[in-house]
Image (cartoon, rainbow, N blue to C red):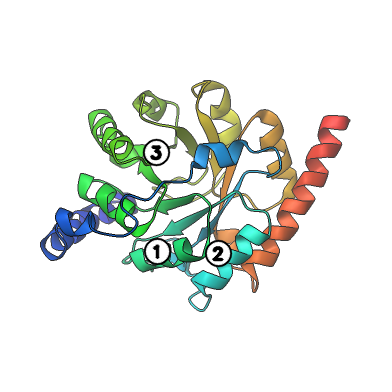
Amino acid sequence: MNILEKIVQTKKAEVEKRKQLYSLELLTQSIYFNTPVVSLSKYLKRKDRFGVIAEFKRQSPSAGIINNDVSVEKTSIGYMQSGASALSILTDDTFFGGKSADLTEARKFNFCPILRKDFIIDEYQIFEARSIGADAILLIAACLEKNRVLDLAKQANDLGLEVLLEVHNEEELNKVNEYVHLVGVNNRDLKTFKTDIQMSRTLYAKMPADAVKISESGISNPQDLAELKQIGFDGFLIGGYFMTQFDPAQTCRTLIRQAWIEYKETINA
């Protein structure tokens, strides 16, 4: 059993347990459930922002503990003040040390798109995402059948949430459907956890023309950001690189500033 299979198996048990504790009716009573969402797609298209989705995560299966001492409030506000276009908040506890309360705390202090980063396999989790203040959810093609992607994406749309479908190869692009707003190429192999941004370069031309396109994982230098933006990517999900630094927000600010310089030099060359 690889790590992705283990995560999904664990997630199924977790979701069933939460269903017993918090009914759908209770979730819909949250103050966030019917509030207007902020469009991740639109924010990534803004000309005054580079398109960085800055992620908050404490640990990962591949890296272990990354940063358990940072504040959600300070880091999320710092990311947005540094020029990030959106936030991504890990809410998986067992493997990433996250929790739903992290996203809700980020929501309290920021008016920006917030992506719920988790392993979503059940409609219940989409109601959860809406109830904790998320604007968009992640669906991972590698752990969902094509029809399941359709069902979950439609449910998200019905609740007003945008959907980012994450793919790892060309075959998974066949799971994109009319309810998917954004398509992300994860440069990390979820079976080996190795990263290679060549995956984004390879898959870009094969991605749906009308989808908002995101490159995820393994990005840590301005040259790669500038190159991927010139290719045509709209967004860049970066977490591990920021979170390993003493000041994630300052690292985010520096990377975005340098990426703008690289990008402008490239297009003016």
Residue 122 in sight in this render: no
Q: Which is more foreground, mark 1 or mark 3?
A: 1
- x, y (%) of residue 20? 10, 62
Query: Crowding near pointer 3: few (<14 within 10 Å), some, many (20+)?
Result: many
- Which residue is at 64% across, 65% downward? 249
Q: Locate residue 167 relative to residue 235 in the image: left or right.
A: left
Which comes sooner in the sequence, label 1 or label 3?
1
The residue that mark 3 highlights is 163
The residue that mark 2 highlights is 76
Query: In terms of depth relative to the viewer, which is nearer, 7 or 266?
Result: 266
* Quadrant assignment, res 170: top left
Label 3 SS: strand
The residue that mark 1 highlights is 104
* Quadrant assignment, res 244: bottom right
Query: Crowding near pointer 1: few (<14 within 10 Å), some, many (20+)?
Result: some
Q: Amino acid at mark 2?
A: Ser
- x, y (%) of residue 116? 40, 52
Q: Locate residue 107 relative to residue 131 in the image: left or right.
A: right
Query: Crowding near pointer 2: few (<14 within 10 Å), some, many (20+)?
Result: many
Q: Amino acid at mark 1?
A: Thr
Label 2 SS: helix
- Which residue is at 81% across, 43% downward? 262
Label 1 SS: helix
Q: Amino acid at mark 3?
A: Val
Extreme residue in the left direction: 20
Give me the C-alpha separation between circle 2 and circle 1. Answer: 11 Å
Give me the C-alpha separation between circle 3 and circle 2. Answer: 21 Å
Residue 225 in sight in this render: yes
